[in-house]
Image: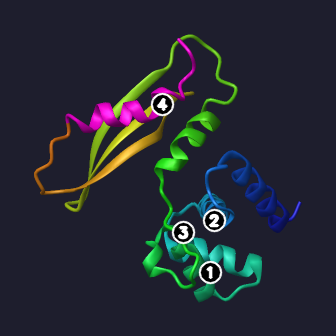
Amino acid sequence: MSRQLQLYQWIDTVVTHFPPLSKPQAMGLALWSFGMILSRSCSLTAVAGLLAPLLGQPFNSMCERLRDTYREADAKAGVQRAELDVTLCWAPWLAWVLDGWVGTQLAIAIDATSLGGLFVALVVSIVYRGCAVPVAWKILKAGEKHAWKPEWPALLKQIKGFLPAG
């Protein structure tokens, strides 16, 4: 099976699992995730370098296309551009992670991770099959005073309605 066919199948899968996203947003997410898996890297250069020849596009065009996935609406070319609100992805992502889950107990982990001296990520994860899979998060600037305590209940509330009953 060709990688191009696999990419298009992956795009269909992502579009199906993330109905709140627009087609361009789901396409960007699919391109990023496909490219990261195959290149074993999350760098823009590595992902664009893998996808550009696969799709027959210039490297710089692919870089711009990938950047548009995470840019603010004002920073994008065109008139009908929208920002990607990652909170819209949390419920579909959680549903996809738990697809096929059986059991009566589900472990939820919360973690604060410092990313260099720039950011702190407050992350809620589902512990599933030996992995902590992030399903909701809040990114804060490091070094700025900000109370974390109210952030945790807010993040947990975001996913509560999407957890299995009981």
Disc 2 versus disc 4: nearer the observer: 4
CA separation in Å, label 4 and label 1? 33 Å
Q: Which residue is mark 3?
A: 69
Q: Are marks 3 and 2 in contact (CB under 8 Å)?
A: no
Q: Secondary structure at mark 1?
A: helix
The dot on residue 62 is 1
The single residue placed furthest to the front in the displayed view is 79
Q: Is residue 8 above or below residue 99?
A: below
Residue 66 horizontal/vertical position (percent): 57, 73
Q: Which residue is mark 2?
A: 35
Q: Are marks 1 and 2 in contact (CB under 8 Å)?
A: no
137 and 77: which is toward the camera: 77
- For image coordinates 49% across by 69% down, the residue present is 43
Q: Amino acid at mark 2?
A: Gly
The verdict on residue 4 being magenta is no
Query: How many numbered marks does the figure carry?
Result: 4
| Dot in front, 1 or 2 | 1
Check disc 4 and report the residue beneath it. 126
Alpha-carbon span between mark 1 and mark 2: 11 Å
N-terminal-most mark, 1 or 2: 2
- Sequence order check: which comes first, mark 4 or mark 3? 3
Above-or-below relation of 35 to 145: below
Q: Is residue 86 above or below residue 154?
A: below
Residue type highlighted by circle 4: Ile
Q: Which residues are magenta?
A: 149-166
**How many neighbours does mark 1 have within 10 angstroms: few (below 14), some (14-19), or many (20 or more)?**
many
Percent position (x, y) of residue 25?
Answer: 61, 63
